[in-house]
């Protein structure tokens, strides 16, 4: 493998941190604004857009260093954007601070998961319910490498050193949480590695590293991007050597995030914490209202909704301990019939009927549109930053219309 040198600044996650690099000096919200400031090359306040794929070598011929002689100590220049570029470097500087490890950015969440499997190359992968695309990636990896797939609840004895447990929490599409420490202990008791897909609950909602995760993954297309306008993925690790190896592999796999997306990501990072806290609060209030009304004899909710699913409704002790900053902004409702589930989205004014999640605007999806494994009565709601009572009133008027239509069709509720 030929030598590729990383722009050293993108490694400097100790910038703004204590000397050991473990405890950020800046609070998380401040880091989102300022962790990349040391990378400023111009005096613009807004971050400039850089689109160049290639960067000029030094004019001074005495400063030219042949590739074979490059070290991380003797260069800090960008060379080619498949390696590093100004916006991806900024994104990594910010996310390394915010996600509490060494962050690498990828072209999508699935590109990140693929990179993790290529890097860890486990003989066995323990994987259960999770985003269907991750199963697709795992199947391709199994076909190429012979990796065996085990259920998430397989006995610990079936795992060996170097194997991987992949845990998604909170879980797509229902927003319910699993106990990260339980799976961390299980993995580590066998010398295996725990990946946590934390897409549904970025900080401040949860930090999987606190509960033993070895690799934290995010689809940056969701909350990190936050405006439904960029695709991206992130892997975060605590081990610097691993980070270097993964960086080198990304250079060859070519899965780095695009420069324009990284610029959008930096723009979005500034408001990440504010958005996520508001979205979490909105979702939790809506779930409280829905689950309360489910128990009320003749409420419109009770007439058409069968069940609400969300981490805030789980009784398990670990949930509140793990989700210190609040519950995820995604939850699911199961309607009483498939036709009600199909009809609800078109009766709503404020929710777009679309897949994906994490954007500032609320979305609803009849999940059977994109996931072949879910119940046809299930709707996934991704709550945005609107006023929560407007969202409640929108849902309520739609439930009332559907309940009235049921009476018309069936003559009964
Ligand atoms: C939990 C989770 N992980 C990973 C992904 C894949 O991310 P991307 O669409 O950015 O590839 C998604 C996408 O919906 C997801 O919901």
Image: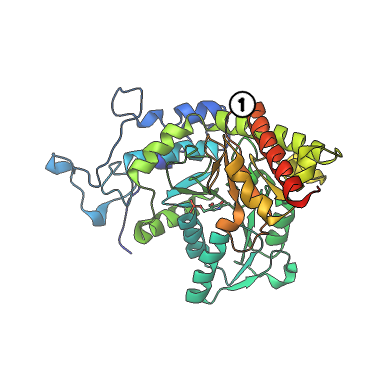
Q: Which residue is mark 1?
A: 387
104 displayed left or right of 27: left
Q: Quadrant of residue 353?
A: top right
Q: Is residue 347 above or below residue 180?
A: above
Quadrant in the picture for residue 392: top right
| Figure colour scheme | rainbow
Residue 209, visible in the rendered structure: no
**Local crowd size for mark 1, using a 10 Å CA cut-off: few (<14), some (14–19), many (≥20):** few
Residue 166 is drawn in which quadrant?
bottom right
How many numbered marks appear?
1
Residue 165: image x %, image y %? 64, 61
Instruction: Give residue 81's position: percent from left, percent from top.
Output: 30, 48
Please tell me which residue is depicted at 47% across the width and 27% down the height of the picture.
33
Q: Is residue 126 visible?
A: yes
Q: Is residue 288 above or below residue 7?
A: above
Answer left or right for 192 relative to 154.
left
SS label for mark 1: loop
Residue 397 is left or right of residue 360, and the answer is right
Depth order, front residue of 334/85? 334
- The image shows residue 328 at horizontal and vertical percentages of 65, 40
């Amino acid at each position: 493998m030929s030598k590729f040198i990383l722009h050293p600044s993108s490694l400097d996650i100790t910038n703004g941190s204590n000397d050991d690099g473990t405890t950020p000096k800046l609070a998380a919200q401040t880091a989102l604004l300022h962790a990349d400031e040391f990378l400023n090359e111009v005096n613009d306040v807004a971050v400039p857009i850089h689109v160049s794929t290639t960067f000029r070598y030094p004019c001074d011929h005495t400063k030219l260093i042949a590739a074979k002689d490059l070290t991380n100590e003797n260069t800090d220049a960008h060379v080619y954007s498949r390696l590093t570029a100004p916006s991806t470097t900024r994104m990594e500087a910010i996310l390394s601070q915010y996600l509490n490890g060494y962050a690498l950015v990828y072209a999508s969440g699935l590109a990140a998961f693929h990179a993790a499997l290529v890097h860890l190359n486990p003989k066995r992968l323990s994987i259960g319910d999770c985003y269907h695309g991750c199963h697709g990636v795992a199947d391709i990896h199994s076909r190429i490498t012979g990796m065996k797939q085990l259920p998430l609840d397989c006995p610990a004895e079936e795992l060996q050193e170097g194997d991987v447990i992949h845990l998604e929490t909170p879980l797509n599409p229902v927003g319910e949480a699993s106990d990260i420490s339980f799976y961390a202990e299980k993995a580590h008791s066998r010398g295996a590695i725990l990946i946590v897909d934390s897409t549904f609950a970025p900080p401040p909602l949860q930090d999987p590293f606190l509960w033993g995760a070895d690799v934290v993954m995010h689809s940056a297309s969701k909350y990190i991007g936050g405006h439904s306008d960029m695709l991206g993925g992130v892997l975060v690790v605590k081990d610097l050597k691993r980070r270097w190896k993964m960086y080198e592999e990304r250079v060859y796999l070519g899965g780095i995030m695009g420069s324009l997306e990284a610029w959008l990501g930096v723009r979005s990072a500034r408001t990440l914490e504010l958005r996520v806290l508001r979205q979490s609060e909105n979702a939790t209030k809506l779930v409280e209202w829905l689950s309360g009304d489910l128990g009320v004899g003749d409420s419109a909710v009770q007439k058409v909704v069968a069940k609400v699913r969300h981490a805030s409704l789980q009784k398990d002790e670990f949930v509140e301990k793990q989700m210190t900053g609040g519950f995820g902004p995604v939850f699911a409702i199961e309607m009483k019939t498939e036709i009600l589930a199909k009809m609800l989205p078109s009766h709503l004014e404020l929710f777009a009927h679309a897949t994906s999640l994490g954007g500032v605007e609320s979305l609803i999806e009849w999940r059977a549109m994109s996931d072949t494994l879910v119940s046809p009565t299930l709707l996934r709601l991704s709550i945005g930053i609107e006023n929560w009572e407007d969202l409640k009133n929108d849902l309520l008027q739609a439930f009332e219309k559907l309940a009235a239509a049921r009476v018309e069709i069936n003559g009964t509720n």
